[in-house]
Image (spheres, helix red, strand yellow):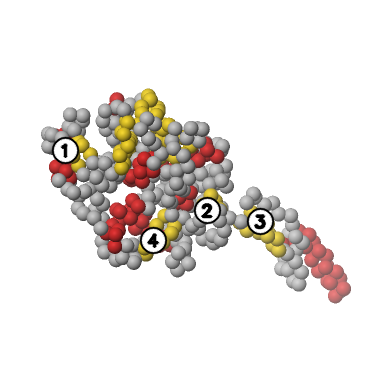
Amino acid sequence: MAIACGVGLLVLAVAVGRWFPRSWWPEIGQSQPDRKLKVRPGREAVSTPGARSTRPLVPEPRADSRGQPPAAAPVSASPGLRGGRTEPGRAAGEATYPRPAADLLEVQVALARRVLSPGSLDGAWGPSTSRALEAFQEEAGLPVTGAWDESTRPFLLVERPALKVYTVTEADRQGLQPLHRSWWGKSVQEALEHETLLERLAERHHVSPRLLQRLNPGLDWDDLPPGQTIRVPDAEYPPPRARAARLQIRLGARWLRAYDEDGRLLAHFPCSVARNVEKRPVGRLHVSVVVERPNYTFNPEIFPDAPESQEPGRKLILPPGPNNPVGLAWIGLDRPGYGIHGTPWPERVGRPESRGCFRLTNWDALYLLRLVRVGTPVDVEP
C-alpha cells in the first residue's frame, strides 16, 4: 500500500511539472539557462543566470503622440545639482557627453547652441521650438516634422550640461531703473534699461524669468547680493562662421533665417510679424542701415492708427536701452518705417502682433547685427 501511494505521488509530481511553467518553481541551488535577448537599438543587453534585463546606454525619454519631448520635471521634485535630485536640463545618471537631449529644456539648449533659436528658453513646447527643430532637421538631412521624434532624437545632442552656475556681481545691478509708462515719460529718461535684476539676468541668459525662478527657488530677486550663485541655462551662441549673403523671412511660419554665400544656414530665429496682413511687405528688400543700441524716433504720421500717436501728437525720441521699443538693435530696410529689430518683450516673439516690422529677441537681434551689412538682401515670403 505504501509503495502504491509513493508511485502515485511520483506520477502526480511529474504531471504537475509538465503542466506548470518552470519559471513558477523556486530555484534551489541552480539557475535557469540563459535566453537570447531581443535588444532595441541604443540598449546594451545585460544577461544574468535566470534573469532577463536591459540597461540603457543613454536615457531614453519618451515623446508624446505629437512628437513633443517630455517636459522638464518640476525643480521641487526633481534630482540634480542640489541634494542629489534632478531638475530641468539635467538628466539623472548622466555620465558622458555628447548624448541625446533628455528633456524639453535640453532640446531647447541643444538647438540654441547651434544658433537655431527656440526663442526665450522656457522648458515648454511651442511653435518656436517646433520650427527650430524643423531647421535642425533640414540641415541634418532628416525628415522635416518639427517633432522630437525617433529619427531626430539620436542626432540632437548635448555636449555638456544644459545648466551652469553664474555668480551675481555688483555690475549686474547698475543702471536698473523704473520704466515710465507713457511715451512722453520714456522720452525724458536718460536710458531705457532693465527694471529688475530678474529681468536683466533672464535676458542675459536667454531664459524666461519664470523658468529662472523655477531653477532657483526661494531666492529674493529684489535683494540678491553680489556673490550669490544661481543656476542658468548654458546656451551661449558660438561666434558667427561667416557673413550672411542673404536673409529669408517666412511670414506664415514667423521665422527669419540667415544663409552664407554657399547657401548654408548660419542662423534661425523666431520673429514677430505685422498683425495686419496688408502691412506685411512681400518681396525682396535690402538692409539700409545697421545700428546697435539705437534710440527710437516715434513719428505719429507713419502710424496714425497707433494708440501712441494720439498721446503726444508729435515726434518723440526715446533713448537707447533693452526696453527701447526696438530693443538693442535696429536693422533698417529700404522701405520707410520697416526694419528688423529687438524688443522689450522676448516672451512674445513669434506672435503676429507688430505694426509691420520684424521683431526678434534682443539677443537674436544683436547676433544678426554681426551677420549683416548694408546691402544684404532680405527675401520676405508669404
State whether residue 212 is above or below residue 370. Answer: below
Indicate which disc, 4 or 3, sits on the residue closer to the N terminus. 3
In the picture of the structure, the residue carrying the numbered disc 3 is 44
- The residue sitting at 17% across, 48% down in the picture is 189
Q: Identify the image quadrant of residue 150.
A: top right
Residues packed near mark 1 inside 10 Å, few (<14), some (14 to 19) or many (20 plus): some
Mark 3: few, some, or many residues within 10 Å (few <14, many ≥20)? some
Q: Nearer the viewer, mark 2 or mark 1?
A: 1
The residues tagged by marks 4 and 1 sit, at their Cα atoms, a distance apart of: 38 Å
| Residue 36 seen by the camera | yes
Q: SS class of the residue under badge 2?
A: loop
Residue drawn 30% across and 39% down? 291
Residue topped by disc 1? 316
Against 67, residue 97 (above or below) is below
Mark 1 or 3: the one toward you = 1
Q: Which of pointers 4 and 1 lies earlier in the amino acid sequence?
A: 4
Task: State the image quarter where residue 115 is shown.
Answer: top left
The residue lying at 33 percent from left, 51 percent from top is 203
> Residue 375 at what x, y percent from top left?
37, 30
User: Mark 2 highlights which residue?
Assistant: 159
| 304 or 22, nearer to the observer | 304
Q: From the viewer's perspective, is the residue at label 4 or at label 3 nearer?
A: 4
Q: Amino acid at mark 2?
A: Glu
Report the number of numbered marks. 4
Task: Report the quarter where the C terminus lies.
Answer: top left
Question: Measured along the vertical axis of the image, is residue 285 above or below residue 169?
Answer: above
